[in-house]
Image (tube, grey):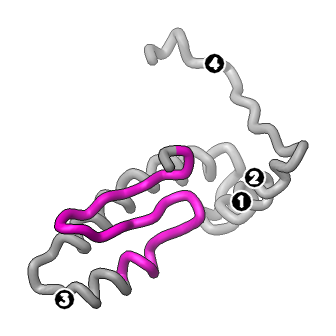
Amino acid sequence: MSHNETPGSVRIRTDDGNEWRFDAIQKAAAFYDCNRSNAVAFACEDVDELVSAARVVLERDDLTRKQRREIAETLSTRAVSFDLESSVTVTKKGDA
């Protein structure tokens, strides 16, 4: 998206069963020690890097299958899960 197409603001719905979103944003703001807008942006950028890093760790040759399973279980969240086959796959909420 080019700069002139970027909206002036973005709304995140926190009503009708989405109240958890506000809590998540508040936690991110506390974690990053910044305002809510920056926290959302930081978290969005970090998630891609964290998933990529987790994939690199899970594909290491020096780990046993059991170690990989334990790491995958530890790193999985309600929105991202790491499944081990002969290769590492990542499933995002909405893909399943």
Residue at (17, 67) in percent of width and height: 86
Is residue 90 rendered to the left or right of residue 61?
Answer: right
Q: Residue furthest right?
A: 16
Front position among marks 1 and 4 = 1
Residue at (75, 31) in percent of width and height: 11
Residue at (80, 38) in percent of width and height: 13
Q: Which residue is mark 1?
A: 24
Give how far apart the Cα atoms at labels 1 and 4 are: 23 Å
Count of numbered circles in the view: 4
Q: Crowding at label 1, few (<14), some or many (≥20) Cα neighbours within 10 Å?
A: some
Q: Which residue is mark 3?
A: 64
Q: Which residue is mark 2?
A: 21
Residue 26's x, y, as percent? 75, 60
Q: Earlier in the sequence, mark 2 or mark 3?
A: 2
Q: Earlier in the sequence, mark 4 or mark 3?
A: 4
Q: Amino acid at mark 2?
A: Arg
Q: Crowding at label 3, few (<14), some or many (≥20) Cα neighbours within 10 Å?
A: few
Front position among marks 2 and 3 = 3
Residue 33's x, y, as percent? 64, 63
**Closer to the camera, 64 or 18?**
64
Q: Which residue is mark 4?
A: 7
Give how far apart the Cα atoms at labels 1 and 2 are: 5 Å
| Badge 1 vs badge 2, beta-carbon distance below 8 Å | yes
Q: Amino acid at mark 1?
A: Ala
Is residue 66 rendered to the left or right of residue 75?
Answer: left
Give how far apart the Cα atoms at labels 2 and 3 are: 37 Å
Mark 1, secondary structure of its residue: helix
Q: Amino acid at mark 3?
A: Thr
Give how far apart the Cα atoms at labels 4 and 2 are: 21 Å
Q: Amino acid at mark 4?
A: Pro
